């Protein structure tokens, strides 16, 4: 199941954006700094994810709305919230970003972003940061263009790598927030060694996030002790009846 299926699923959104005479104006409210919030935790940052479904799990928790979960996450000590906005495979929606804004926490738009138009649109939402997956860009120039678009629209790019090649491309492009995904989105398999194998390449001034497969506080502590600045946790929280209570086990 190649990554291209996710890109293909975004073509309808892109067609809509391309048909617009003008994109929405930039978000008028205050956006809290994403990297700043992670660093302020001193190595104990948790990005809690609102995730209703996934290709590997199917429907996870369709019954809890973003307002309800946002309050739970904020009350349980989340540093930031990742909001899945991809509709076809993850049952997400960009409207969930607006629903999460009252938490006052930095929001990450997590989606399969391939075009500067999507970056410009995201700037009209409360998102402080946006996921940029290295492997979705065939050339380094296209990757660099996306990071430039993020800077133009005052969005912090969270640049995701799966392996050493991805990481080298991210660092060469000047990425400052790097996310190591322990799940290979092509195979959907989890390999926690991805994080431990790559953390040694962390450079001064970079903020590193480990994502996917983090199921227990003990595992999270091990990853933080290895040198990561933050954990991104989604399925382990959302599959519980009380995601906030589960999150509290990590933030404590």
Image: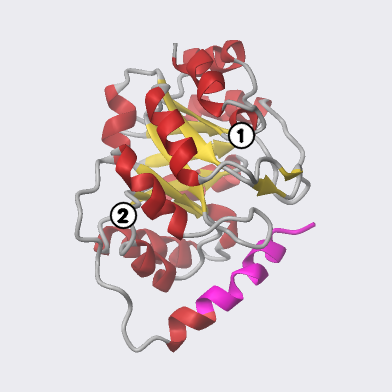
Q: Between disc 1 and disc 2, whose residue precedes?
A: 2
* 9 magenta-colored: yes
Quadrant occupied by the C terminus: top left
Q: Estimate the x, y position of residue 33 in percent, counting from the top left.
A: 25, 41
| Residue displayed at 19% across by 60% down | 28
Quadrant occupied by the N terminus: bottom right
Decide if residue 202 is in sight here.
no
User: Seen in the image, is 204 located left or right of residue 32?
Assistant: right
| Residue displayed at 35% across by 34% down | 206
Q: Nearer the viewer, residue 86 or 170?
A: 86
Q: What is the chief secondary structure element of the magenta stretch?
A: helix
The scheme the figure's colours follow is secondary structure
The Cα atoms of the two marked residues, 1 and 2, are separated by 26 Å
Residue position for label 1: 238
- Measured along the vertical axis of the image, is residue 114 above or below residue 166? below
Residue position for label 2: 155
Q: Estimate the x, y position of residue 74 in percent, counting from the top left.
A: 38, 29
* 224 magenta-colored: no
Q: Estimate the x, y position of residue 153 in percent, counting from the top left.
A: 27, 62
Residue 70, image quadrant: top left
Label 2 secondary element = loop
Count of residue discs: 2
**Segment colored magenta:** 1-14
**Other residues around mark 1 within 10 Å, as few (<14) / some (14–19) / many (≥20):** many
| Residue displayed at 28% across by 39% down | 104
Label 1 secondary element = helix
Decide if residue 145 is in sight here.
yes
**Other residues around mark 2 within 10 Å, as few (<14) / some (14–19) / many (≥20):** many
Q: Which of 20 and 147 is in front in this view?
A: 20
Q: Nearer the viewer, residue 33 or 145?
A: 33
Q: Estimate the x, y position of residue 48 in percent, counting from the top left.
A: 48, 33
């Amino acid at each position: 199941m190649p990554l291209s299926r996710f890109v293909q699923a975004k073509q309808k959104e892109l067609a809509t954006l391309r048909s617009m005479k003008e994109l929405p104006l930039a978000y008028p409210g205050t956006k809290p700094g994403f990297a700043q919030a992670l660093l302020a935790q001193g190595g104990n940052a948790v990005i809690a994810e609102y995730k209703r479904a996934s290709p590997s799990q199917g429907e996870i928790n369709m019954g809890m709305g973003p307002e309800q979960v946002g309050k739970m996450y904020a009350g349980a000590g989340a540093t930031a919230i990742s909001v899945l906005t991809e509709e076809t495979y993850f049952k997400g929606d960009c409207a969930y970003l607006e629903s999460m804004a009252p938490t006052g926490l930095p929001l990450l738009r997590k989606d399969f972003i391939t075009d500067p138009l999507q970056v410009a649109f995201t700037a009209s939402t409360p998102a402080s940061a946006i996921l940029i997956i290295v492997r979705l860009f065939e050339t380094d120039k296209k990757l660099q263009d996306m990071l430039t678009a993020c800077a133009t629209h005052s969005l912090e790019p969270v640049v995701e790598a799966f392996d050493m090649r991805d990481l080298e491309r991210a660092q060469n492009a000047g990425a400052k927030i790097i996310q190591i995904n322990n799940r290979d989105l092509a195979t959907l398999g989890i390999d926690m060694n991805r994080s431990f194998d790559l953390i040694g390449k962390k450079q001064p001034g970079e903020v590193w996030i480990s994502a996917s497969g983090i199921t227990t506080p003990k595992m999270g502590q091990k990853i933080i002790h290895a040198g990561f600045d933050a954990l991104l946790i989604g399925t382990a929280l959302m599959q519980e009846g009380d995601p906030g209570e589960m999150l509290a086990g990590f933030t404590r």
